[in-house]
Amino acid sequence: MKTELEQCTNAFGTFQLQRLPLQKKQTLRAWDAADEYLLKYCDENKLLSDDTKVLIINDQFGAINTSLHAYATQSWSDSYINALSSLHNLRINRLDPSFQGVASTKEPEGVFDLVLIKIPKTMALLEDQLIKLKAHIKAETVIVSAAMARNIHRSTLELFERILGTTTTSLARKKARLIFTKFEKTEPLKPPYPNNLHIKSLGIYLKNHANVFSKNKLDYASLLLIEQFKQLPKAKHIVDLGCGNGVLGIMAQRQQPESKISFIDESYMAVASAQMNYENIHKQLDNAEFIVGDGLSQPPAGEVDLILCNPPFHQQYSIGDQIAWRMFTQSFKCLKTGGELWIVGNRHLQYSNKLKKIFGNSRVLAANKKFQVIVASS
């Protein structure tokens, strides 16, 4: 796919950057003013040297990793696409991928002199990261966080204060703001996640890591989809696409216990939650596989009969249907002839029309005032 390269110039050089997943008509950049502000602050205050141990947290599309390619850094994130973006942008700039990627389900190695954080949308993820970070910093560690000003709330600052210590903010620049935190509260804290969730209506208990969608209750869209599972077609191989905590795949296998289930998500915490829940409920993993990946860009082995999906309509702070479109297109290519895609979504998103453009057909199986369950056949 040919897409335009956008040029990002900052104190560390000029870089060509692309936002993943690649799109023919990309309207959003791979960096924002908060990235620019954070890098400018690092340069002006001479925070980096050859022996500085640097931890980068939540670098969404690799702008920070790419800019700081000359330094040995660890990059800690819950997103497979984040890591893929960093590698992609280093490659197109012909730079050595020297950073070490660390999944959110693991912890960074060592103690760091400088910690750079992009504030995620999910505060539970930030809380989990800050609690685990305490074991990897010292009193002298410089901790600088960044976000667009509209995404920094009093609760955000209170979280830093409660877990780490004194927290202040910068003046706004291009609608972005920095957060400065001193590490003072050295006592260890127990992370509140994974939590326990009892879904009485389904008769199951689930555990959810911090960044899992709808971790405190079953969302109404998924419940509407699950209520239709008695009508599922016979399927030897089912994919729970964008699996979250795995509830769709787990409940589908309750209807069809002989089926193989593939759980796929770009969130390390989601896939870990799905695996934990599947094993707790089914007591074995023989008929299941768990894949952290970029949707169905690398389809699971074997023919797929049925795909279940509650597609997201946001990527961090940006809202749109591009991720859903991509999931639908990937599903069309992945399903065997006669296979079906079952999705649930908000009525106003008009997924039925989108599926007709891709599959040539779609039908609304169930609906309420807010959501629709839609089926498309390959």
Image (cartoon, grey):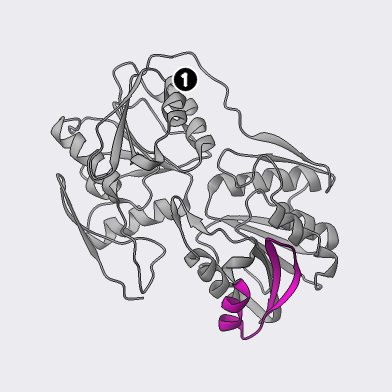
Please say whether residue 300 is visible from this viewpoint: no
Residue 108 placement, left or right of 267: left
Mark 1, residues whose alpha carbon is within 10 Å: few (<14), some, or many (≥20)? some
Where residue 355 appears, x then y in whole percent? 60, 77
Where residue 336 appears, x then y in whole percent? 66, 79
Please say whether residue 196 is visible from this viewpoint: yes
Region of the chain picked out in magenta, as a range: 351-377
Which amino acid type corresponds to the residue marked 1 in the rendered image? Arg
Of 2 and 96, nearer the camera is 2
Q: Quadrant of the N terminus?
A: bottom left
Vertical relation: 377 (above or below) 175: below
Where residue 248 appears, x then y in whole percent? 72, 57
Would you name the residue on which mark 1 appears? Answer: 162
* Residue in the image at 81% along x and 64% along y: 229
* Residue in the image at 25% along x and 39% along y: 38
* Residue in the image at 71% along x and 47% along y: 218
Of 152 and 100, nearer the camera is 152
Residue 275 placement, left or right of 116: right
Q: Quadrant of the C terminus?
A: bottom right
Res 110 → quadrant = top left
Residue 248 placement, left or right of 100: right
Of 357 and 277, nearer the camera is 357
Res 141 → quadrant = top left
Res 39 → quadrant = top left
Q: Is mark 1 on a helix, strand or loop?
A: helix
